[in-house]
Amino acid sequence: MPVPARSALFASAMLLLPLHTAKAAEADASVTEKSEIIVTGIADHQTSSATGLALTPRETPQSITIINRERIEDYALTNVNDLLAQAVGINVERVETDRTQYNSRGFDVTNFQIDGIGLPLISGIQFGDMDTALFENVETIRGANAIMTGIGNPSATINYVRKRPLDEFRATVSAQAGSWNQWRLEGDVSVPLTDTLSARLIYAHEEKDSYLDYNHVNRDVMGGIVSWQVTPQLKATIGYARQENNADGVLWGALPLVYSDLTQISYPRSTSTSADWTYWNTTDQNAFAELAYGFDNGWSVKGVFTYKQFDEQAKLLYAFGTPDKQTGLGVYGMTGIYPSAFKQYLGDFYASGPVTLLGREHSVAFGVSTASAHSKEWEGFSADLLEYPDIGQWDEGLLAEPAYPDPYLASDYKDRLTRVYGAAHLKLTDKLKAVVGGSLMWLKTTGTAYTVDQYRKDSKFSPYAGLIFDLDKHVSLYASYTDIYNPQPEVDVDNHRLAPTKGTSLEAGIKSRWFDGRLYATAAVFRAKQSGLADYAGTFEDSVRSYYIGVDTTSTGFELEVAGNITDQWSLSGGYTHLDIEDDDGENTRTWLPTRTLKLSTTYMIPQLSDLKLGGQLRWQNAISTEADGATVRQKGYAVLDLMTSVKLAAHVSASVNVRNLTNSRYLNSLMWGQAYYAAPRSALATMRLDF
């Protein structure tokens, strides 16, 4: 399958990362709290990502996974792709070196938030390696998210929770060195400037070569947040973050998977269809200003304005064709220059608090948000058709860089989204609670992208309803329903945009908390459906652009998950996902998605041995397949095992070692686009950390 139209992919990415936010993760907590970071057990961790209400996972009638800062540091999860690969129910589709997609419950993840609110449009694609240095933890809420988005797929919502200034001095400096000339420096300092003013500064620099031929990445991340407690009730916060990701020798598309005789190709793991003159450089900047006021009656209001700017400079090479098995010839390349620019403005007003009704106290939340985005993309597509040498010579840098025309403005369009949303947590009886709410949105898009008219104007109400019944103080039963609506960027054979897909999500299960809230265990069954979902149908003859048809798709399955601490020294997190994905004829579809996955992570600390910590994380998935160039391509099931150890060397000084893919498992990263490249072999990373 060829690479999807670049304009649609770029449109997705523009609305991915800091689709920035309106409120903190604990939005209805008083603004006089010392810290917005909750450090109790996972079962008591409050999040408002799913409903807008600050509820614990047990109080939320959906499946939630939280990966906290401790786990991020234990396993050196310095980029979001590595982190989300460990999240229960989330699949990371590394389709290229610098473009990644995510899916859950059979559908693409399109909803991304920071501190609880985002702007979910089209499909979600991550450009480059998004660094985790700026975030305290990452939450994934599986199923549709009607209240906080109203748009998207019934897959999952990923919420990145920012680090915030603390009321006491804290500083961390770390240095890393590892395989393929990787090295990294990171610093994180929180300083109380006065009794009411505090600041937090974060910086990270990382450079690394790769197991892939030609590939090198240079990344800089910086962020700063200042919080001012103006009065005991009023708090003001401003922040700025910037990430520069410069990558050379990048993959646009990946490796052809079959020979001309339709047999599957086996490459060395380092094989790349890139060249040393390709690059993909991105700069992502965002700034926000937040004002929050807490009333004496428990109500709070918050307003946030966010500005985001994303700039890109790329010179990309796409390989296509089926090589001859004897000569290794028959692969060709197309290349182009792609500058692009994106700007986004987001304003959000949010209020929450308690209400008394029929002798019981309930909590409600409501908000209004409006956002506008303007994207431009230029293309300078070379007229030269490149011919690859024999497969065995791809690592010798034999492709000469061609000439390029001056780029023309290929894509220029604007999005405008306005939403009104609300939710209520109702205590119907001492044991029975309900969460109800919804989101009403108005969406308008104007402009063109690669000759395709992007115009759309629509409105949609997405309802949400859930029930939670407490069997006792440890165990609850729950069920929830929501529907959702998702505009699609894909076009049909007549070059017209597909109609928006409509989806529903049903979930029911059991949740429990143990050991004073330190350990959280759940079991859930679910059914997610989408009508008219874009499915690849072919390629236009005059380009690499794809066209699609709409297919009704249903996924059903169950999940088991556990997270938290069994003892003060022993942590355990992970879960199992089982699903079936069928089209409207009852046949298996989207076969490139794993339907059985297992993820486990554990650490054990021995305080008597200088806080020695030992840990491991395991990720397993079943076999997958896809159709590529007239043949069925398969990837067998595989498991990846990572190990870690850390020890305290002296006061404030610790060291750790991480070994990834210990058994050196060999597998293709993703079959999503009908091309693929191999995952990294065994590697090691050492870290030295100073904490004050």
Image (tube, rainbow, N blue to C red):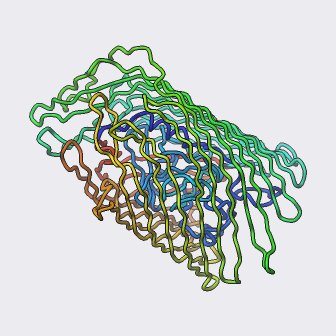
Quarter of the image with the N terminus is: top left
Instruction: Say which of 622 and 358 sits in front.
Output: 358
In the figure, residue 42 lies in which quadrant? bottom right
Residue 564 spot, x, y in % from top left: 56, 68
| Percent of width and height locating residue 639 | 33, 59
**Residue 442 versus residue 599 in the image, above or below:** above
Instruction: Report the front residue among 570 and 357.
Output: 357
Q: Is any part of residue 681 visible from this angle?
A: no
Residue farthest toward the bottom in the current orientation of the protein? 472
* Residue in front for this viewpoint, 475 or 462: 462
* Residue drawn at x 19%, y 26% as measured from the top left: 389
Q: Tell me which corner region of the image, top left, top right, bottom left or bottom right, holds residue 16.
A: top right
Q: Left or right: where does residue 8 sit relative to residue 365?
A: left
Q: Is residue 388 above or below residue 373?
A: above
Q: Is residue 546 left or right of residue 265?
A: right
43 sits left or right of 683 in the view: right
Q: How far from the left and from the top, in percent, is residue 241? A: 65, 37
Q: Nearer the viewer, residue 342 or 597?
A: 342
Number of numbered discs visible in the structure rendering:
0
Residue plotted at (44% across, 52% down)? 108
Q: Can residue 119 be seen in this snapshot?
A: yes
* 65 left or right, relative to 2: right
Q: Please identify the residue farthest to the left as the structure is shown.
A: 326
Residue 619 spot, x, y in % from top left: 39, 59
Q: Is residue 228 above or below residue 401?
A: below
